[in-house]
Amino acid sequence: MLWVDLLKMIDNGYHIPVLLHAAVDGLVLNPNGIYVDVTFGGGGHSREILSRLGEAGNLIGFDQDEDADNNKLDDYRFTLIGQNFKFLKNNLKLMKLSPVDGILADLGVSSHQFDSAERGFSFRFNSLLDMRMDKSVELDAIAVLNEYSEQQIAAVFWDYGELRESRRIAKRIIELRKTEQINNSKQIIDLVRGLVPRQKENQFLARIFQAIRIEVNQEMEVLKSMLEQTVEVLKPGGRLVVITYHSLEDRMVKKFFKSGNVKGLIEKDIYGNSNCPFKEINRKPIIPASEEIEENNRARSAKLRIAERKIEK
């Protein structure tokens, strides 16, 4: 399918699926198998998966964002679960669908979430700082910025934004909130002005907003939990396909694929063989072609990794 056809396929304006064919090519090996799209969103990847499944195939979608329910697919082979993918194992067991043939995770924030000003994910809008993917959760960006200690805030920007200026940013936040509540994106933009050269401001702000968002949604902890569950949930020979958008995610996925744990520690049996339950299908990540990046700028940082659950001998 040409990229222009891919664009036509998504007519709801929610999200253009990144690395669509590479991801599904690496995932669907059994047309009558059971597959899981743990980041359903606009349903782009799910549509493509369903197009390759036979009548006996099944697809389970997960998405904690209630807006995704508007994109539910009308197909008897499809079920959408409105929960965070950290509940992957429990839901599949409840439905008696475990183990499965493949799992797809397209991580990060959807275009719909970025483009909805009221959600507070983007510094392009002067909006309230929410950033919750699940709007029923209590912790939001306003709480992080106004209730965390200076040390906690600095740690968020260091750990999740990899910002050298983390302590300076935290100090400015503490000073500002002595006189006013920090609740909108303009306050953050004004607060960090002058910390970096003007031509690097957008990249700098993107990291700040990324760090706050990761903390609000506990994204790294949730990703770790999901990856660890796949060891039990995937059939031998089943595929795990993950698309990441920043180095923190990609680093964790890479370590997990190589070792079977997020720390990257390779354990060996008494014969010196690795106990890792996965084998990497592609040692180097697959990245979008220039044509895809030109049509969809949000694909520029995407990396696709594929691993297969080892078949025990």
Image: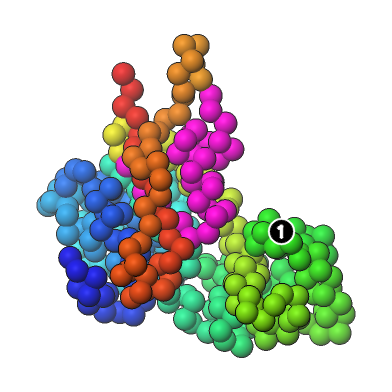
Q: Position of residue 146 (x, y in %)?
A: 77, 73
Which image quarter: residue 239? top left
Q: Residue furthest top?
A: 270
Q: Residue furthest left?
A: 55
Which quarter of the figure is the N terminus placed in? bottom left
State yes or no: residue 254 in magenta: yes
Q: Where is residue 61 in the image (x, y as percent from the top left)?
A: 34, 58
- Residue sitting nearer the eye, 203 or 125: 203
Q: Where is residue 280 in the image (x, y as percent from the top left)?
A: 38, 37
- Residue sitting nearer the eye, 208 or 126: 208
Q: How crowded is mark 1: few (under 14 residues within 10 Å), some or many (20 or more)?
A: some
241 w.r.t. 69: above or below = above
Which quarter of the figure is the C terminus placed in? top left
Residue positioned 43% across, 66% down in the render: 300
- Residue sitting nearer the eye, 166 or 225: 166
Amino acid on which the number 1 mark rests in the picture = Trp
Residue positioned 59% across, 80% down in the render: 123
Q: Read off the residue under disc 1.
A: 158
Residue positioned 71% across, 59% down in the render: 158
Magenta part of the protein: which range? Answer: 239-267
238 w.r.t. 154: above or below = above
